[in-house]
Amino acid sequence: MIRFEHVFKEYPRSGLALNDVTFQIRKAEFCFLTGHSGAGKSTLLRLIHMAERPTRGEVLVSGYSSTKIRSREIALLRRKIGFVFQDFRLLQNRTAAENVAFALEVTGAPRGAIRSRVSKLLAQVGLASKSEAYPSELSGGEQQRVAVARALAHNPMVLLADEPTGNLDERATRGIFELFRSINAAGTAIVMATHNLDLVRSAPTCRVIELDHGTVVYDSGRES
Amino acid sequence: MAYAVREALAAFRRAPVLTSLSAAMIALSLFVIGLFGIAAHNVRRVLDQVESRVEVVAYLRDNASTDAVQLALAEVRAYPEVLEAFYVSRDEALERARQQLPEFRTLFGELEVNPLPASIEVRLLPGQRSPEIVQRVAERISAYPFVEDTRYGREWIDKIYLLRRIAGAAALVVGGAFAAVATLIIGTAIRMAIFARREEIQIMRLVGATDSFIRRPFLIEGLLTGLIGAGLALSLTYTTYKVLFRAVFELAWLPDTWVVAGLATGGVLGLLASSIAVRRHLREL
């Protein structure tokens, strides 16, 4: 489903961000990406999302190759990929429901279908009662749940999460992680970049890929 | 499409000053073009009227034989440029002079000898009245040995043509300069709109909106700004025409096709400016 083939990513100013990275993520897999700041975790996620292209090597996502994909196809690919960030990235002038609906509106979903889909998504992340609240009226954990609901809007095959619990307290972190586990159990693969090693240790069945200076130094999936 | 139109209209609410300024600039540039357009159109009308009166007059020598003149007249009538040609005898010329110049009536009455020559008057077909053609016809007629002189008012024909060209060129230059400024201002307005909505645009990209979908509201915004500007220019031009021009001297309003072309120009200008701005600035996000 996701394959990295000898991927190098170099930036003109900061140098090599990924150094000969090769791995594969299968359907419905839960994979942690760990490593210190600047190890290349975010770059790796951006390459999966095709927000960037590798300097060398090839990234394959759901049949699309980074060497051949066209800009219109990138838009279509992104409908199969959900993405959540540490800073939530919600639109402050829209309610929780409107933030989720936005993802459907801008991809041309029929208006009639949007409302019921949004209700289902908000119920799935446990925010049915707060659909009319603005982000500023929600806690960090709740805002991240709205972001997750938005990321799930198109029934993605994979959910990418870049430090999704970085701004959350322990309880909210646990809640988001449990939400991810339930999403994963329903068949969506998860690739989650995190610094939180306690969280990683608490889920020994999940795969862990550790990066250091752009190189994969540990991959529990490969060992197995 | 409903989303794009809704967002484009929302842009007018979000930044009313900037969008109004853009529309005003388009209005100003088209207003200038409109005023010059009225001038050019009216010069053209005058020119058409004057042109219809353009004639070549060949004054004949006194010893010209009637047969030779009749033969020449038949030949001249056969020229492809000629609408009609007729002979004016010396007596007819004197009679005409008496009627057209009543202040000299006594002078003409005292004359013992008619000083006026006979002539052949030639009218040209519409579309065959340019200075070059008039000159060519006059030269051909001059070739007859019994023709003493030809007159065709070449100078003022040239001047009117020049005036018409100047009005057209001035409209293009001044209006073009304003249009260029309008394009820049619309570009800036769109740029600011993109900047104000950059978070939204980033999220749109994140969730898989296509580039054309992202561009559409900005393009519609540009188109609407252009059309509003053009509408404003039209009402400004019409008001000026009514209030000022009508009071001073009689003028004709612009032909419908010009009005439609002006409105379309406004729309195209707005669309063009926004499409350039969107292409440039979306890439930066």
Image: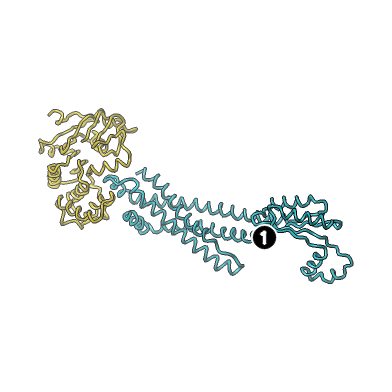
Of the 4 image quadrants, the one containing the N terminus of chain B is bottom left
Chain letter for cyan, please.
B
Q: Which residue is mark 1?
A: B52
Q: Secondary structure at mark 1?
A: helix
What is the image's colouring? by chain
Quick check: A116 left or right of B85?
Answer: left
Q: Amino acid at mark 1?
A: Ser
Image: B127 above or below A67:
below
Q: Residue at 33% across / 57% down in the picture?
A: B6
- Seen at 60% across and 55% down, the residue is B167
Instruction: Give the quarter of the image for residue A187.
Output: top left
Give left or right: position of B143 versus B276.
right
Q: Quadrant of residue A224?
A: top left
Residues packed near mark 1 inside 10 Å, few (<14), some (14 to 19) or many (20 plus): some
Write down which chain is painted yellow. A
| Chain for numbered disc 1 | B
Q: Position of residue A138 (x, y in %)?
A: 19, 54
Say which quadrant the C terminus of chain B sits in. top left
At 75% from the left and 55% from the top, the residue drawn is: B74
Of residues A50 and B144, the one nearer the viewer is: B144
